[in-house]
Image (cartoon, grey):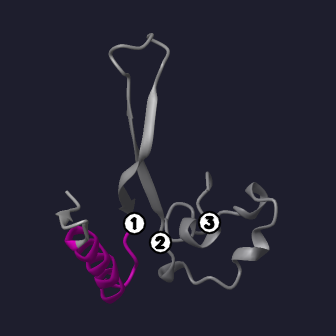
Amino acid sequence: MNMPPVPYLKRIPALADMDLEEAYTNAQVWEQFKPGLLTLCSPDPQAFRPPEKAANVLHVGPPTNFKAATFEDERHNGLLCELEADIDAATLDGMTSR
């Protein structure tokens, strides 16, 4: 998604009273979402220029970490912390994820 959903943008004080619906093809799909219960998550793809390749070659691998915006309620942010801890504790073939 290139554009944050309307309920998330409504959490930003400077945007809360703006008519943002015109920026969307169908903003009505977001009407039932409560702003405080919506977060954003974006992956950080791993990109690098392979030294043996030409200058215009870029290798982009799958994301290895994600950034998540907090919720309005700190109790709900506990879920994000729990997810982070679970991911850090994950193993693959007996090796740690890091």
The quadrant holding residue 65 is bottom left
Residue 98 versus residue 45: which sits nearer the camera? 98
* Residue denoted by label 3: 5
The N terminus appears in which quarter of the rendering? bottom right
Q: CA distance from mark 2 to mark 1?
A: 5 Å
Locate the C terminus and report the quarter of the image it occupies.
bottom left
Q: Nearer the viewer, residue 18 or 3?
A: 3
Residue at 45 percent across and 10 percent down: it is 54
Choose between 56 and 66: the one closer to the eye. 56
- Examine the residues drawn in magenta and state their main secondary structure: helix
Q: Position of residue 39 (x, y in %)?
A: 47, 71
**Residue position marked by numbered label 2 in the rendering:** 39
Query: Mark 1 highlights which residue?
Result: 69
Three-letter amino acid code at the position of disc 2? Thr
Residue type beneath disc 1: Ala
Q: Hey, which residue is sitting farthest top in the picture?
A: 54
Whether 75 is among the magenta residues is yes
Range of the magenta residues?
70-89
Query: Which percent across, then down, holds residue 97?
Result: 23, 61
Q: Earlier in the sequence, mark 2 or mark 1?
A: 2
